[in-house]
Each structure stands twice: as C-alpha cells, then as structure tokens.
Image (spheres, grey):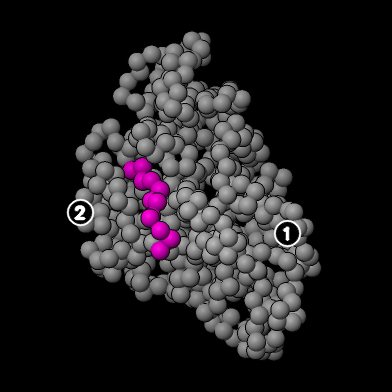
C-alpha cells in the first residue's frame, strides 16, 4: 500500500450557497468562506472541497454550468477565488473544486451554437437523435423524472439529458470535446487548485445504441447497466489522466452512480492510472424502495455493515476508499443514520467515530460537525431543489397521497442538507443579514457553532478530538480491518490493526442497552468515548461508541 498525502487527509465539503453570506444578498459566497477559514482549520481537516461556483443559471444549483472558466458573480467572481486559493494555502490547507463534465447548461455557448444547425461546428459536442417530435428515440427516464430526450425545433432532432432538460449531455466520443475539458482542467490546476471531485463521472461514456430498458428493471439496475460504466469510460479516464491530471500533484475523487463491487476497482486501482478514489452509493441507496428515494424503506443494518466490509476488502491492497455518510445530495446523516431527537448528540458523535475509524479518506459535510438535522418544511412551497420539485410534480400527476409524499420529502429531499449553516443565535443564525435563499432550520437556537464552541462535551469539540486522534494514529488510516460481529442486529464491532497497534471499535446503532462479552475488551484500554464516562464495561448504552487501543 503506497502512502500519500491525500490518503492521510480529511476533507471538509462546503456547499457555498449555504455556508456564509458576506454580502447580505442571502446567498453564501467565497468571501464568506474566507471569513471562516480559521474555523475550518480549527477542525483539523486538510482539504476543502467546494461545490460548483462557476457561471450558471442555477437550475440545478450550479451543476448546470454555462462557463467553466468564469466564477459566478453571486459567489464573488474569479478574483475572489484567486484570493481564496492563496489564503487556503497560507493556512496549510488544500482546495478541490467540482468538475461537472457529463453535461453543461443549455445556456453554455457550446449548446447555444450546437442547437442552431447540424452543420454548426459545436453540434457534435452533444448527443442528438433523429426522430419525430412525439416519438422518443427510446424509453429512458431522467434521474430527475420524465424523459431523457428533448426536442430541438431548429434541427428537428432530440438531444440527450440524463438530468434536467436544461443539462444536455456532452458527447465524449468527440475528441474535440475531450480536448476542451482537458483545457478546463489545466486552467484550474495551473491556478493552484489541488484536485477535483468529478460529478457523475461514471456516466461520460454512452452506449451509443441507446437500447430500451426492460419495463420491470429497477432504476438502480438501469443506472448500472445502461447509463453508467459505458464501453469507453476507462479509455476516457486514462486519457484524461495522461493528458493533464498526471502532470500535477493532485487528488481526484469520482462520483460514481452505477459503480459497484464488480467494477469499482477498475476506476481506482493504482496500476490503472485513472482516479484516486470514487464515491459509490451502495450505502446511500440502502433505504430506497422499489420506486426510488421517495419510496423509503427501513434501513437493513446488517447489509449496511456488509457494504463497508465488502468495499474495504475490494480496495484493501490496490486502490483507495472514500468514507462518507452524506453530502449535498442526501439527508443529514444524524437524521438518516442516527437518532436526531433524544440521542442526537450521542449518535452524531458515533457517526463521526465510524467515519474516522474506517480505512479510506474521510469526508465531512458542512454542519454535520454540529449535528445539523433534516428540516421538515411545512409545505412543498418552501423547497428549492429541482429533484424534489420534479418528484412532487410527478407524484401529484400520478394521484399519490401528497400528505404521505410530503413525509417522504421530509426524509429524503436534498434540501435537508442545503439549509444555511447555523453559526450563532442571531437572526438567520448568522448566515446572512439579508433574506436567505432557503429558510434556516428553526432549530438553530439549539444547534449552532457558537454555543458548541463553549461546551467541552459538544458534538463540535468531539469532532475535533476524533479528527486529531486519527491524525496521531496511522493504523486508523492504513491498517487492516475486520468486522467481528457481521450478523449482530445493533452492534458494529470491528478491529483495525497493523504491526504497530491494534484498535477495537464498538458502536451501538440503537436505543437499546446491550451487554458485551467480558473477554472482548481484555488487553485493551479505552481511549475514545462519546459519553462522559463508562458506567459499566460490560454494558453499552444507546448510541454509545467506544474506541479501545491494545495495551
């Protein structure tokens, strides 16, 4: 196992629109991030990942890019980013950006030109299919609902959009497109960016026959077998690495919808020379029902543990894992995987202990370090996310029970993680002096940074301790892993070890008091605990987490 700086790093993800507004216009910005760099540094993290801040109409909150080399004026423009890069590096931190190159905005100049004529030099930058206006080329469904094909009157053909109709997919078969993308990557890396999180990178190679999907196939299988892992994806990623990525000392992590245990290693094996890490979603789709995320089912805890174990086994000797439980596309981790009511503090501490004691690079999403929760707005009118709004519209058309659907939105909407960062007790929790682009969670007076800084037993101060502990113990980064209780319905118990140290980690993922075998902790000292003290070595409390180190 090769050692490297990015394997030993901890990543803090920022959703800029919701982090800190310095201008008073209700939208978080780059100067707001600069203002909070000391706070970020104090957590003990190493890398800041910033979600898209490029020019964009904002249909999908920046994941619809209209100019890859310009920073949106709402966020402060290019000069503000130059200042941020400089100040991040002065703090001894690194910064990575989002690379969104499966699709552009329909407002990008390439697409404006492409739709004018079949003879336009930009036409082949996108994916087109002949047809008649009401006869779709195939039965594919968009990730955000509806068809993946949109008619263009000017050229009398359809263009492909796997996401919104305002996000046409790029044609990676065209070498000119790839050259443009490598130029964009080089532009930002030459400015000092330390790497990229690559949005839906597993989708860039298309199966150009565009065959129909079977009627009874789950969307997860459609993603794996029709949309993702196309025939040339590894060729394209190797070319990208060879042409530009390998020329810099950077880190790359690919977002991988459709990536699974059968193909995951192909993306990250060191000898393949493609990406450093991927985000797979096996554990983040675990509560999706037959109809998808808005048809939630109870979490299968044994399956949850099995996913971590299988991915660790896969990448143990060749490749590297990303360890995360949430981000800007999912619910708050304490609301989804913990108990955000009577055991919010304990379960938030347990979840970060899990993240910090598994093999791989840990990712923290803004606000999780204070235990921010899902929001549960009273009606759909408060929601902003295009995925949520499209799902609501489709459910309404299909005659679903909309009161029940709102409950599903409360559980699963991406807006749960996009509410403004809760800084203090002031109006709008100190996020903005204006009106926020989306309402602040009403619980901000109980959950905020300023209160937790003063409390030595707070979630925030626990995050700092567990991050520091991981940094001091390389065994938790590179060491071996073994699940000791794979079939226990509530306990996640595993060992991490190398030639220098051995750790035993016990998490109780339940509201129950559970007995422990006396012998399990023999020859170990307790070094980390999410309660103030241990009352009974042989009994573990609700949502208790313990880290033991061998004597």
Secondary structure mostly taken by the magenta-highlighted segment of the chain = loop
Above or below, comparing residue 369 to residue 22 in the picture:
above
Above or below, comparing residue 19 to residue 353 in the picture:
below
The residue wearing badge 1 is 226
Kindly identify which numbered label has been placed on residue 420.
none
Residue at image coords 61%, 25%: 487
Looking at the rendering, in which quadrant would you find the C terminus?
A: top left
Observer able to see residue 182: no
Residue span colored magenta: 369-381
Kindly identify which numbered label has been placed on residue 426.
2
Q: Is residue 372 magenta?
A: yes
Question: Where is residue 23 drawn, in percent x and y?
Answer: 26, 68
* Left or right: 285, with 515 as reference point: right
* Left or right: 49, with 175 as reference point: left
Q: Is residue 30 magenta?
A: no
Q: Is 488 or 68 nearer to us in this picture?
A: 488
Q: CA distance from mark 1 to mark 2?
A: 49 Å
Question: Where is residue 353 drawn, in percent x and y?
Answer: 43, 33
* Mark sitting earlier along the chain (1/2): 1
Question: Where is residue 511 drawn, in percent x and y?
Answer: 44, 27
Residue at image coords 57%, 69%: 164
Residue at image coords 62%, 67%: 146
Question: Which quadrant of the figure has residue 27?
Answer: bottom left
């Amino acid at each position: 196992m090769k050692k490297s700086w990015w394997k030993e790093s901890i990543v803090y993800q920022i959703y800029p629109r919701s982090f800190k507004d310095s201008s008073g216009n209700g939208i978080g910005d780059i100067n707001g991030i600069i203002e909070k760099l000391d706070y970020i540094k104090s957590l003990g993290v190493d890398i800041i990942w910033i979600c898209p801040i490029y020019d964009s109409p904002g249909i999908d909150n920046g994941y619809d890019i209209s100019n890859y080399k310009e920073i949106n004026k709402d966020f402060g423009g290019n000069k503000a980013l130059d200042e941020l890069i400089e100040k991040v590096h002065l703090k001894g931190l690194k910064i990575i950006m989002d690379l969104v190159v499966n699709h552009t905005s329909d407002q990008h100049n390439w697409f404006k030109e492409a739709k004018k004529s079949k003879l336009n030099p930009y036409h082949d930058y996108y994916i087109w299919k002949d047809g008649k206006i009401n006869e779709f080329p195939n039965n594919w469904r968009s990730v955000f609902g509806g068809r993946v094909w949109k008619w263009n009157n000017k050229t009398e053909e359809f263009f492909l959009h796997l996401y919104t109709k305002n996000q046409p997919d790029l044609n990676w078969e065209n070498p000119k497109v790839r050259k443009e993308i490598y130029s964009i990557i080089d532009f930002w890396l030459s400015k000092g960016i330390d790497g990229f999180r690559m949005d839906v990178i597993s989708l860039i190679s298309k199966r150009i026959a565009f065959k129909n999907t079977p009627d009874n196939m789950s969307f997860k299988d459609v993603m794996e077998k029709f949309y993702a892992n196309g025939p040339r994806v590894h060729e394209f990623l190797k070319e990208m690495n060879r042409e530009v990525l390998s020329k810099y000392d950077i880190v790359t992590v690919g977002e991988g919808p459709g990536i699974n245990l059968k193909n995951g290693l192909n993306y990250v094996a060191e000898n393949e020379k493609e990406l450093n890490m991927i985000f797979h979603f096996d554990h983040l789709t675990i509560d999706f029902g037959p109809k998808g995320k808005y048809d939630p089912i109870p979490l299968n805890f044994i399956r949850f543990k099995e996913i971590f174990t299988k991915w660790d086994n896969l990448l143990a000797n060749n490749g590297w894992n990303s360890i995360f439980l949430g981000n800007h596309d999912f619910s708050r981790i304490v609301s989804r995987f913990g108990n955000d009511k009577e055991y919010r503090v304990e379960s938030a501490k347990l979840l970060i202990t899990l993240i910090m004691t598994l093999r791989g690079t840990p990712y923290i999403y803004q606000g999780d370090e204070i235990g921010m929760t899902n929001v549960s707005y009273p009606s759909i009118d408060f929601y902003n996310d295009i995925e949520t709004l499209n799902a609501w519209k489709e459910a309404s058309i299909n005659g679903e029970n909309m009161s029940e659907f709102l409950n599903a939105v409360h559980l699963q909407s991406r807006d749960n993680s996009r509410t403004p960062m809760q800084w203090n007790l002031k109006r709008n929790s100190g996020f903005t002096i204006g009106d926020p682009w989306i309402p602040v969670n009403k619980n901000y007076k109980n959950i905020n940074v300023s209160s937790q800084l003063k409390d030595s037993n707070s979630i925030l101060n626990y995050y700092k301790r567990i991050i520091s502990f991981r940094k001091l113990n390389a065994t938790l980064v590179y060491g071996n892993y073994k699940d000791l209780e794979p079939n226990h319905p509530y306990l996640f118990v595993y060992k991490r070890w190398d030639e220098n140290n051995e750790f035993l980690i016990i998490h109780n993922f339940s509201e129950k008091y559970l007995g422990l075998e006396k012998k399990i902790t023999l020859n170990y000292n307790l070094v980390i605990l999410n309660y103030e003290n241990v009352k009974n070595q042989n009994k573990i409390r609700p949502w208790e987490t313990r880290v033991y180190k061998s004597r």
